[in-house]
Image (cartoon, rainbow, N blue to C red):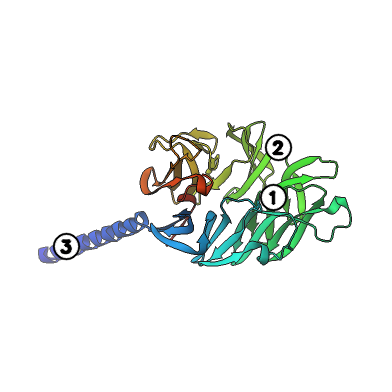
C-alpha cells in the first residue's frame, strides 16, 4: 500500500470516529433535554383554573370554586373542585374533562336529600373513578344506613354498609384491580383501617390510611400508626417505617413514587415543611416558604409547591396574604400571591393546589 493510500485510509478512520462521537453527543443531549409539560391546578381571582407551562386556562363555570386535584392522561386534562366556602361538606363537587364541567352528584346519580361525601378521584384508560360514602336511599334498617362505595363511569359498587359513615381516602387502579383505602366501621362502632381490593377488605393495624402508589417493587399504601408513617407493600405484605408524624390531626399524608427507581417520597400534604425520601427526612432550605402543598417526581426531577398562608382574621390586617411558588429541582419556576378578606371566608383568592407532570 502506498503512502498516499495510507494517508487516505487514516483520514477516513478519523472521519468515522468523529461522526460516531457527534451522534453519541446528540443522543446524550436529547436525553438531558427531554421536555416536560407541567400542570398546576389552582385558582386566581376566586375562579378555578389550571396552568400548563405557566399559561393559564380558566375553568368553565369556575367562579367561587377551589380546585382539589389535577391529572393528565393521553392529553386529556382532568380537574376536581369544590365550592368555597364549602358549607355543604360533600367533598368533591365538580370535575372538568378538557374544561367541560360536570356536577359530581348528578354524574353519580346521588339522590336529593341524602348525606354523602366524595373524597377521591382517579382516571384510568379514560375510565373515571370516584370513591366515598352515600346515605342509602332505600335503607331497610339502621344497620345499612350508609354505604361505602366506589363508582366507575357513574356506576356504583358498594363495598360496605353500616349504621355509621366514614369517608374513603384514596382510590387506585392497577390493571383490572381496584384498591380503595378507607376505614370499616361495624354496628358496634368498632373501627378498622385498611383497604379494599376488588371488594375484599384487608385490615391494617393503624391510626389512619392514606394513598396508594406503585413502583418496581409493588403497590404501596401509606399509613400512620402511633404518630409514625409507614408504607405497606401490598404485593409482598411487608411494612417499612418511614419516619415521625408530627401533627395532631391524623389526616395529612401523601406518598409518591419515582418512575426511574424504587424511591418513595412522603409529604405531610398541605401542612408539613419537610418530606421523606424513603426513610430519610429532608428539610428543604432553598425557600423560606414553610409548607409543602404538593410534590411530583419524574425522571430525577423534583417538582414541589411550597406556600405560606397568613389568612387568619387579624383586626390590624383585614386583607391577609397568601404566597405559593413552584420549584423545579429547588429553583423557582412559577409563583402566585393573593389576598383574603372576611367576604371570602378567609380563603385565598388565588392559590396553587395540585401538580402533575408529563413528558411530551
Helix, strand or loop under label 2: loop
Mark 1 or 2, closer to the camera: 1
Helix, strand or loop under label 1: loop
Quadrant placement of the N terminus: bottom left
Rendered residue at 79%/47% (across/down): 164
Residue 130 is situated, as x and y percent measured from the top left of the image, at 65, 58
Residue 78 is situated, as x and y percent measured from the top left of the image, at 54, 62
Mark 2 or 3, closer to the camera: 2
Q: Name the residue under label 2.
A: 206
Helix, strand or loop under label 3: helix
Circle count: 3
Q: Mark 3 points at which residue?
A: 11
Instruction: Name the N-terminal-most of marks 3 and 1.
Output: 3
Q: Which mark is residue 168?
A: 1
- Between the C-alphas of marks 1 and 2, the distance is 15 Å
- Between the C-alphas of marks 2 and 3, the distance is 71 Å
Instruction: Name the N-terminal-most of marks 1 and 2.
Output: 1
Amino acid at each position: 500500500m502506498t503512502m498516499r493510500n495510507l494517508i487516505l485510509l487514516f483520514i477516513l478512520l478519523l472521519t468515522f470516529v468523529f461522526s460516531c462521537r457527534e451522534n453519541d453527543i446528540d443522543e446524550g443531549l436529547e436525553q438531558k433535554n427531554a421536555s416536560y409539560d407541567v400542570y398546576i391546578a389552582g385558582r386566581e381571582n376566586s375562579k378555578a383554573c389550571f396552568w400548563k407551562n405557566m399559561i393559564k386556562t380558566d375553568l368553565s363555570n369556575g367562579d367561587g370554586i377551589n380546585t382539589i386535584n389535577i391529572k393528565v392522561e393521553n392529553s386529556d386534562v382532568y380537574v376536581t373542585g369544590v365550592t368555597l366556602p364549602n358549607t355543604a361538606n360533600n367533598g368533591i363537587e365538580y370535575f372538568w374533562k378538557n374544561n367541560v364541567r360536570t356536577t359530581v352528584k348528578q354524574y353519580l346519580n346521588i339522590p336529593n336529600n341524602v348525606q354523602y361525601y366524595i373524597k377521591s378521584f382517579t382516571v384510568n384508560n379514560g375510565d373515571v373513578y370516584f370513591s366515598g360514602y352515600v346515605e342509602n336511599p332505600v335503607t331497610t334498617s339502621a344497620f345499612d344506613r350508609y354505604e361505602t362505595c366506589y363508582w366507575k363511569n357513574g356506576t356504583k359498587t358498594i363495598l360496605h354498609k353500616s349504621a355509621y359513615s366514614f369517608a374513603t381516602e384514596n382510590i387506585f387502579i392497577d390493571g383490572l384491580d381496584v384498591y380503595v383505602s378507607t376505614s370499616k366501621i361495624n354496628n358496634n362502632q368498632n373501627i378498622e383501617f385498611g383497604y379494599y381490593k376488588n371488594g375484599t377488605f384487608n385490615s391494617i393495624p393503624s391510626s389512619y390510611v392514606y394513598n396508594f402508589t406503585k413502583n418496581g417493587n409493588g403497590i404501596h399504601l401509606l399509613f400512620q400508626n402511633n404518630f409514625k408513617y409507614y408504607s405497606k407493600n401490598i404485593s409482598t405484605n411487608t411494612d417499612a417505617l418511614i419516619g415521625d408524624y408530627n401533627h395532631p390531626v391524623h389526616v395529612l399524608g401523601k406518598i409518591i413514587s419515582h418512575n426511574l427507581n424504587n424511591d418513595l417520597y412522603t409529604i405531610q400534604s398541605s401542612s408539613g415543611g419537610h418530606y421523606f425520601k424513603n426513610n430519610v427526612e429532608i428539610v428543604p432550605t432553598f425557600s423560606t416558604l414553610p409548607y409543602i402543598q404538593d410534590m411530583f417526581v419524574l425522571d430525577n426531577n423534583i417538582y414541589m409547591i411550597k406556600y405560606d398562608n397568613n389568612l387568619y382574621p387579624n383586626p390590624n390586617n383585614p386583607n391577609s396574604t397568601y404566597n405559593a411558588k413552584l420549584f423545579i429541582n429547588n429553583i423557582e419556576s412559577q409563583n402566585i400571591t393573593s389576598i383574603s378578606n372576611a367576604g371570602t371566608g378567609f380563603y385565598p383568592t388565588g392559590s396553587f393546589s395540585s401538580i402533575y407532570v408529563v413528558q411530551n
